Image (cartoon, rainbow, N blue to C red):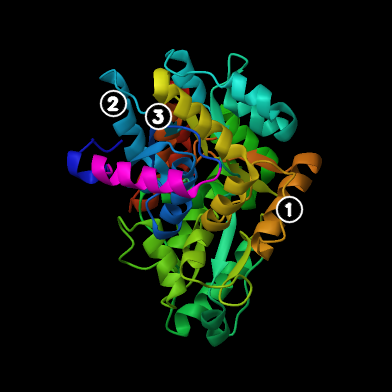
Amino acid sequence: MPSFKRNCFTATRFPRTGLALATALAASLSMTSAHAAGEVEVLHWWTSGGEARAANVLKELMEAEGYGWQDFAVAGGGGETAMTVLKSRAMSGNPPSAAQIKGPEIQEWGELGLLGELDEVADAEGWDDLLPETVADIMRYDGQYVAVPVNVHRVNWLWGNPDVLEQAGVEMPTTLDELFAAGEAIREAGFIPLAHGGQAWQDATVFETVLLATGGTEFFQRALVDLDPEALGSEQMIEALETFKRLRELMDEDMSGRDWNIATSMVINGDAAMQLMGDWAKGEFTAAELTAGEDYLCAAAPGTADAFTFNIDSLAMFRVEGEEHEAQQALARLVLEPTFQEAFNLAKGSIPARPDLDMSEFDACARQSLEDFQRTAEEGGLVPSMAHGMAVRADVQGAIFDVVTNYFNARDMEAEQAAQRMVNAAQAAL
Ligand code: GAL
């Protein structure tokens, strides 16, 4: 875990006067506005171009109802820095109204007794009927809703630049063998085959996708969700690690520390052919006004067409009182309403958290995502992303990240050794 440095995040607050002005304007513009005050402070890590556009949808909807929005944006893909900042705020007894907290971590915050419940809104809005059980389950602590889902991201995607692929005479690869073969041709044509950012969470994102491709969903579940020591130390794990490390051949030398959205921009501007990344990358293509299927391509990551690694973003609610509580409950209600779900997810690259919405505005990648989500939920193949905090608790995730990233960067660590470290990491954390 990197140590927390004050200058590595940005916490943007709107000046009081600006906020008052915006609120007054929104209130006078909105037909529905009846609320006078109440303000939410929302911690999140949606700071790339596409993500900021998406987050802004919620701010505008709150303001249109007359509520205030204090943006607590903490830069850093994957949210590790955001979580460090959140912990220090909560420890000082001053948590925000809501924070981007996901998966099993919601349970950890619930156990600390810091989360407030949303049952009144959930009952009034019929969340039990709106949400798939897989999603609703994650949002409850001790039987009560404490968080609200904003979306469903798919992690196992490959993004491609069609011009670069064409110049190299290759197509989007569907297997890992094809990926390595295409990589050689792309390199010979003078491009970087795979854009990557050397940060622990990005290494882990690519690693879990390779493990899914080489080992399949059952193995993924045993190793990265159930933390079965036999699976973690197995031949299959060694194969996944070795294949993952071979991907370095397709990456460039300057990847160390690079942010994920910079890697996406390398695909956008034609320096690189492809990127393995979750569909928040689509938010960057969308923000650059590019069209799916024409200006850029999406496909299930090579070897994973039958699987779906899910990553559900959610906002968990802290215990707050008075007007802030009222505003917080409105925030929760707005998040699951169709207006937000559509506008946010169009900008974010994900699909709505509720499956009953009209998808006609969404592109082919999003429609494929929804179809694959539903198919894999029914037929098997739907797995929670370890790299994005959906599978295991934060301490185990951190320990696995360390092994993965150290192995990926080490000159002299064998895959066998890394697999053994993986066993130890999971055991120590249990
Ligand atoms: C994920 C998060 C996404 C996106 C991504 C990059 O963990 O779920 O919403 O923000 O990190 O930061």
Name the disc covering residue 358, or none: 1
* Disc 3, SS: loop
Identified by mark 3, the residue type is Gly
**Residues packed near mark 2 inside 10 Å, few (<14), some (14 to 19) or many (20 plus):** few
* Residue 205 position within the rendered picture, expressed as x and y whole percent measured from the top left: 49, 49
Between 111 and 116, the one lying in front of the other is 116
- Tell me the residue that label 3 is attached to: 38
Is 14 within the magenta?
yes
Is 420 within the magenta?
no
Residue at the (30%, 55%) spot, across then down? 257
* Whether residue 66 can be seen here: yes
* Residue 48 position within the rendered picture, expressed as x and y whole percent measured from the top left: 39, 56
- Between disc 1 and disc 2, the foreground one is 1
Residue at the (34%, 52%) spot, across then down? 409
Identified by mark 2, the residue type is Arg
Magenta stretch in the rendered image: 13-31
Pick the quarter of the image with the N terminus: top left
Q: Is mark 1 within 8 Å of ligand 1?
A: no
- Looking at the rendering, which quadrant does residue 369 occupy? bottom right
* Residue 238 position within the rendered picture, expressed as x and y whole percent measured from the top left: 53, 45
**Residues packed near mark 3 inside 10 Å, few (<14), some (14 to 19) or many (20 plus):** some
- Between disc 1 and disc 3, the foreground one is 3
Distance from the alpha carbon under mark 3 to that under mark 2:
20 Å
- Tell me the residue that label 2 is attached to: 89
Nearest to N terminus: mark 1 or mark 2: 2
